[in-house]
Image (cartoon, helix red, strand yellow):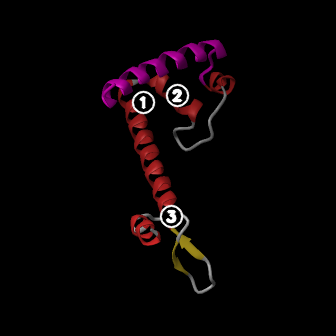
Amino acid sequence: MHFRRQRRRAGEVSLNEPLETEKEGNALALMDVISADDLVLEQMEQSESAALLRQLVTEHLDKREREIITLRYGLSGQPPMTQREVAATQKISRSYISRLEKKALEKLEKIYVEKDGG
């Protein structure tokens, strides 16, 4: 009975089982390798989405919308700005910035959904 149970479990692998041990005695487990790959994939997906978003902003928004979205969300490498700060740079009211931003985001969302396949 014991040998049958052992044979069934022979193909099982524990995520915490050490794969190798460093000279210092630190063990590298399967979970460490898998989670690192997940982070890399997630970062790649985020990077691809950000690149697509920048492309959509450049190609589909008019100059004013592009400037507002770029300033509001820090797409030019600068820290994101508040609507009030953007309004001051554009010399228009904060509420108008809000309306323009909303319109631009809706436009981007519609185009993104079409490009992404729904």
Which residue type does callout 3 highlight?
A: Ser
Q: Is residue 56 magenta?
A: no
Residue corresponding to mark 2: 69
Residue corresponding to mark 1: 57
Q: Is residue 102 magenta?
A: yes
Which of the marked residues, 2 or 1, is nearer the chain's N terminus? 1
Seen from this angle, which residue lies furthest bottom? 23
Quadrant position of residue 24: bottom right
As helix, strand or loop, the secondary structure at mark 2 comes to helix
Contact, mark 2 vs mark 3 (Cβ under 8 Å): no
Measured along the vertical axis of the image, is residue 107 above or below residue 70? above
Query: Does residue 75 appear to the left or right of 49 in the view shown?
Result: right
Q: Would residue 57 be seen by someone viewing this image from the given angle? A: yes
Quarter containing the C terminus? top left
Alpha carbons under labels 3 and 1: distance apart: 46 Å
Which residue type does callout 1 highlight?
A: Val
Seen from this angle, which residue lies furthest front? 1
Query: Does residue 18 appear to the left or right of 108 in the view shown?
Result: right
Residue at 51 percent across and 57 percent down: it is 35
Which of the marked residues, 2 or 3, is nearer the chain's N terminus? 3
Contact, mark 2 vs mark 1 (Cβ under 8 Å): yes
Q: Which mark is residue 14?
A: 3
Question: How many numbered marks are there?
Answer: 3
Quarter containing the N terminus? bottom left
The image shows residue 43 at horizontal and vertical percentages of 48, 50
Q: Which residues are magenta?
A: 90-118
Classed neighbour count for the residue bearing mark 1: other residues with Cα under 10 Å, few (<14), some (14–19), many (≥20): many
Judge by depth and name the residue closer to the eye, 17 or 49: 17
